[in-house]
Image (cartoon, grey):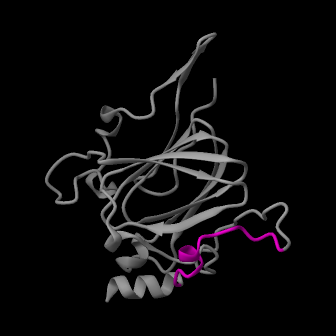
C-alpha cells in the first residue's frame, strides 16, 4: 500500500490516493465520496457558486494526453476541481494567484507534484493548474460548475513570475511540451492579474 501524500503547501489544496481492491476478476476503486469534502473551508471553493450551499460536483470529464502534452495553466474563479489520475503519470503544477489578486503577496505560491495512477488532487477556485503527461495519461476530473467560457481563464505555462520548474520533454528537439493553440496564446500572469483586478 502507498504512503499517504504529504500535506499541500497551498491553502485549500489536498492530495490523496485512490484505494483499489483487486482480485482475479479485476478491481474496484472509489474515485469520489461526498463526505470526504465536508471539512473543506468555504474559501477553498466548497460552497456552490452562489455561496449558499455545500459543494456539489455537476460534471465529470475524462482527459487523455500523449506523453509530452502540457495542459495549462488554467484558472477558475468559480470552480473547484477534483482530479484523479486513472492511468499514467502526470507532473502537476499548481499556482496560487489569490495572494496576487488581493494584494497580500508580490509572488504566487507554486507547488508541483508527480501523480501516478490513483493519485488525486483537489484544487480550489483561484489556484491555477496544469499538468504535463510524462507517459500516456488518463485523467478524470470532477468540477463544481458546468463549462462556462467566462470562467475559463489562464496564463502562459512558462510565465517567468510563476517559474514552474517543468521537466524537459524527452524526444522534443528543444525539450518543450506540446500545447494547444489556446494555451500557447495565453497572456502573462501579470496581464491576467491586471485584467482580473481591473
Between residue 11 and residue 33, name the one nearer to us. Answer: 33
What residue sits 47% from the left and 88% below the top?
191
What residue sits 35% from the left and 71% below the top?
149
**Quick check: is 196 in the magenta stretch?**
no
Q: Is residue 74 above or below residue 136?
A: below
Q: Position of residue 110 (x, y in %)?
A: 56, 65
Q: Residue furthest left?
A: 52
Q: Position of residue 170 (x, y in %)?
A: 83, 60
Q: Is residue 130 above or below residue 103?
A: above
Q: Is residue 31 above or below residue 121?
A: above
Image side of residue 100 versus residue 181, left or right: left
Between residue 151 and residue 50, name the one nearer to us. Answer: 151
> How many callouts does the rendering have?
0
Q: Position of residue 195 (x, y in %)?
A: 38, 87
What residue sits 85% from the left and 62% below the top?
171
Q: Position of residue 178 (x, y in %)?
A: 69, 68
Image side of residue 134 versus residue 187, left or right: right
Image side of residue 166 versus residue 34, left or right: right
**Quick check: is 186 in the magenta stretch?**
yes
Q: Quadrant of the C terminus?
A: bottom left
What residue sits 45% from the left and 28% below the top?
30
The majority secondary structure of the magenta stretch comes to loop
Q: Find the magenta span and give its range.
A: 174-187
Between residue 12 and residue 120, name the one nearer to us. Answer: 120
Image side of residue 171 versus residue 128, left or right: right
Q: Quadrant of the N terminus?
A: top right
Amino acid at each position: 500500500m502507498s504512503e499517504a501524500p504529504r500535506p499541500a503547501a497551498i491553502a485549500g489544496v489536498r492530495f490523496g490516493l485512490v484505494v483499489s481492491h483487486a482480485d482475479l476478476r479485476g478491481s474496484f476503486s472509489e474515485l469520489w465520496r461526498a463526505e470526504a469534502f465536508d471539512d473543506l473551508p468555504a474559501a477553498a471553493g466548497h460552497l456552490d457558486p452562489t455561496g449558499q450551499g455545500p459543494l456539489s460536483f455537476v460534471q465529470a470529464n475524462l482527459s487523455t494526453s500523449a506523453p509530452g502534452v502540457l495542459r495549462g495553466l488554467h484558472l477558475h474563479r468559480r470552480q473547484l476541481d477534483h482530479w484523479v489520475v486513472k492511468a499514467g503519470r502526470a507532473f502537476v503544477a499548481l499556482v496560487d494567484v489569490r495572494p496576487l489578486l488581493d494584494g497580500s503577496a508580490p509572488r504566487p505560491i507554486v507547488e508541483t507534484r508527480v501523480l501516478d495512477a490513483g493519485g488525486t488532487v483537489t484544487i480550489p477556485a483561484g489556484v491555477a493548474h496544469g499538468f504535463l503527461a510524462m507517459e500516456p495519461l488518463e485523467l478524470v476530473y470532477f468540477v463544481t460548475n458546468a463549462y462556462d467560457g467566462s470562467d475559463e481563464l489562464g496564463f502562459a505555462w512558462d510565465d517567468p513570475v510563476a517559474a514552474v520548474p517543468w521537466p524537459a520533454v524527452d524526444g522534443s528537439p528543444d525539450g518543450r511540451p506540446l500545447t494547444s493553440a489556446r494555451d500557447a496564446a495565453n497572456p502573462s500572469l501579470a496581464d491576467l492579474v491586471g485584467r482580473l483586478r481591473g
